[in-house]
Image: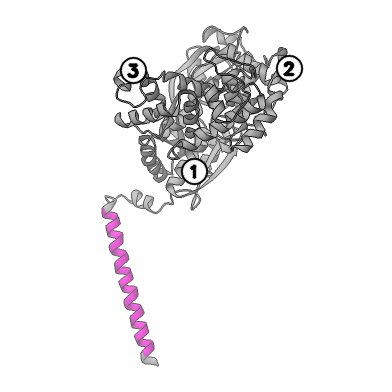
């Protein structure tokens, strides 16, 4: 028995000795690989994220970053963060705060891995934090309400009350400008978001504020009287922000983003969130806002009924119908299409519609036809892209969609992205491109414009009806009653 114990002890000592030798060898190898840099060696043992298995994103509840919409969690920053988490095999955790100040504090205190809330890369922030790659470009603009008093230049700004976000890139820029214009003054606040300050300008509660160009572009759909006085900065990049100790994640982020961009996913995301806001038509938006109040209640039950029946967002059907007929059930075009969904005689016949001027038949038929087109779109497209492609096919025909996809392949572009079809569809009007395609000439710019306008109407509609995050972007009677305008 004692002999066996001695053997066990000897074996244990031998194993321990082997383990120490192996550990020493690994240690030496790691030092060699790290170039004898002990800081790099320490980096190798740091976790990828602050919470094992989880990627924690701190963001703000704003239309350009993160919100709850009719189809769940949405937003440019959210969708990009979700793609990152999926690619890294991590669970995504969203920490929502109310201000930029809270976002920066959360990162500084290590309560989140990444701050993703429309943050501009600025010298002041780069002194305290590290950044991921630039993903979008914006410009700071001074905003006022149409026909209201406003400064014509920076020097005149001293005569107006100006309120901006605290610890924002706007405040940093104003501090820079103050060196040249010492009398420049403003009030910084954490109480409101930029979107809310823009609303206050629209309500004439403030004469002006500062907003990034992308935030203003989105909000002009809801508050069309907002105008740009002048820009106060050059174009600036937006980027995600990380704690300065989190460099391993920064490297992972840069590597992932390069792939994400190369595969066309960034273009798709930009198109999905900003493609419909590039062109602003003040008169058209004003008319649409009025008709949401006066006409939509009559037809909304049918849009909801057939949206549910054919598994389509009812707001998308309503927006399509508005683009087609401006919700006029008796509409008739010079080419013979008729009704609230403007169906051709042939399409109506194929769908079994007897009376195109019947609102019930027209909406039901239009929804069924759109569902049929959507089912023919390849599933290789992201879901929002599939809807855009189906809408384009509704306008120009599926044959030309196939041609545009074929043209995309010949031009070495990804045919499974709507952002690509936005480029190739307009080319179908040029002989050098359409002459070798099966379906020939098409006025390809029209379906692109058609899709953008529908998405714009849908975005406005969901905002006005309080469908974009009921807690933060709820329906506001002031949007109806103020100055008698909707």
As displayed, is residue 411 above or below residue 4?
above
CB within 8 Å, label 1 to label 2:
no
Q: Quadrant of the N terminus?
A: bottom left
Q: Which-is-in-front pick, marks 3 and 1?
A: 3
Helix, strand or loop at label 2? It is helix
Residue 353 location, quadrant: top right
Examine the rendering and report whether any part of residue 12 can be seen: yes
Q: Position of residue 307 (x, y in %)?
A: 62, 34
Q: Nearer the viewer, residue 230 or 479?
A: 479
Q: Which-is-in-front pick, marks 1 and 2?
A: 2
Give the class, few, some or many, for how many residues have Cα within 10 Å of label 2's Cα (few <14, many ≥20). few
Q: Earlier in the sequence, mark 3 or mark 1?
A: 1
Q: Is residue 181 one of those drawn in magenta?
A: no
Helix, strand or loop at label 1? It is loop
Numbered badge on residue 113 = 1
Residue beneath disc 3: 430
CB within 8 Å, label 3 to label 1:
no
Q: What secondary structure characterizes most of the magenta part?
A: helix
As displayed, is residue 254 above or below residue 352?
below
As displayed, is residue 86 above or below residue 154?
below
Q: Position of residue 288 (x, y in %)?
A: 62, 17
Numbered badge on residue 481 = 2
Residue 470 location, quadrant: top right
Residue 360 location, quadrant: top right
Q: Is residue 150 left or right of residue 3?
A: right
Q: Nearer the viewer, residue 265 or 197?
A: 265
Q: Residue at x 31, y 18 (%)?
A: 431
Q: What distance separates the C-alpha of mark 3 from that of mark 1?
A: 49 Å
CB within 8 Å, label 3 to label 2:
no
Q: Position of residue 430 (x, y in %)?
A: 33, 17
Residue stretch rendered in magenta on the structure: 4-32
Q: Residue at x 69, y 27 (%)?
A: 475
């Amino acid at each position: 028995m004692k002999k066996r114990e001695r053997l066990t002890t000897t074996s244990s000592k031998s194993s321990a000795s082997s383990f120490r030798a192996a550990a020493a060898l690994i240690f030496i190898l790691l030092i060699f690989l790290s170039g004898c840099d002990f800081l790099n060696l320490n980096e190798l043992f740091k976790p990828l994220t602050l919470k094992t298995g989880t990627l924690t994103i701190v963001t703000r509840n704003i239309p350009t970053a993160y919100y709850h919409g009719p189809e769940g969690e949405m937003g440019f920053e959210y969708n990009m963060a979700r793609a990152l988490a999926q690619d890294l095999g991590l669970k995504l955790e969203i920490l929502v705060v109310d201000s930029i100040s809270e976002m920066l504090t959360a990162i500084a205190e290590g309560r989140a891995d990444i701050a993703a809330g429309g943050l501009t890369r600025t010298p002041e922030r780069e002194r305290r934090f590290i950044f991921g790659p630039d993903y979008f470009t914006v410009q700071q603009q001074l905003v006022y309400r149409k026909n209201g008093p406003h400064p014509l230049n920076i020097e005149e700004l001293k005569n107006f009350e100006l309120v901006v976000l605290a610890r924002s890139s706007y405040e940093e820029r104003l501090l820079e400008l103050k060196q040249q214009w010492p009398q420049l003054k403003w009030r910084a606040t954490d109480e409101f978001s930029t979107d809310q300050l823009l609303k206050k300008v629209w309500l004439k509660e403030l004469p002006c504020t500062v907003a990034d160009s992308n935030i203003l572009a989105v909000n002009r759909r809801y508050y069309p009287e907002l105008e740009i006085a002048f820009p106060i900065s050059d174009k600036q990049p937006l980027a995600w922000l990380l704690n300065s100790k989190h460099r391993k994640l920064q490297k992972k982020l840069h590597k992932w983003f390069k792939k994400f961009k190369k595969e066309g996913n960034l273009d798709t995301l930009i198109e999905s969130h900003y493609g419909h806001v590039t062109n602003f038509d003040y008169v058209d938006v004003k008319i649409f806002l009025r008709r949401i109040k006066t006409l939509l209640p009559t037809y909304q039950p049918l849009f909801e009924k057939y949206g549910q029946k054919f598994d389509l967002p009812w707001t998308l059907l309503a927006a399509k119908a508005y683009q087609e007929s401006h919700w006029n059930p008796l509409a008739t075009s010079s080419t013979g299409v008729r009704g609230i969904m403007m169906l051709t005689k042939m399409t109506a016949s194929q769908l079994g519609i007897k009376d195109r001027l019947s609102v019930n038949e027209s909406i039901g038929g239009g929804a069924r036809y759109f569902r049929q087109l959507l089912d023919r779109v390849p599933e290789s497209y992201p879901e929002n892209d599939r809807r855009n492609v189906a809408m384009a096919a509704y306008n120009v025909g599926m044959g030309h969609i196939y041609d545009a996809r074929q043209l995309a392949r010949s031009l070495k572009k990804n045919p499974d992205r709507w952002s690509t079809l936005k480029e190739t569809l307009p080319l179908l009007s040029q002989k050098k491109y359409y002459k070798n395609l099966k379906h020939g000439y098409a006025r390809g710019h029209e379906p692109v414009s058609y899709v953008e306008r529908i998405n714009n109407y849908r975005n406005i509609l969901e905002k006005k009806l309080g469908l974009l995050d009921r807690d933060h972007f709820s329906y506001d009677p002031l949007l109806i009653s103020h100055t008698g305008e909707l």
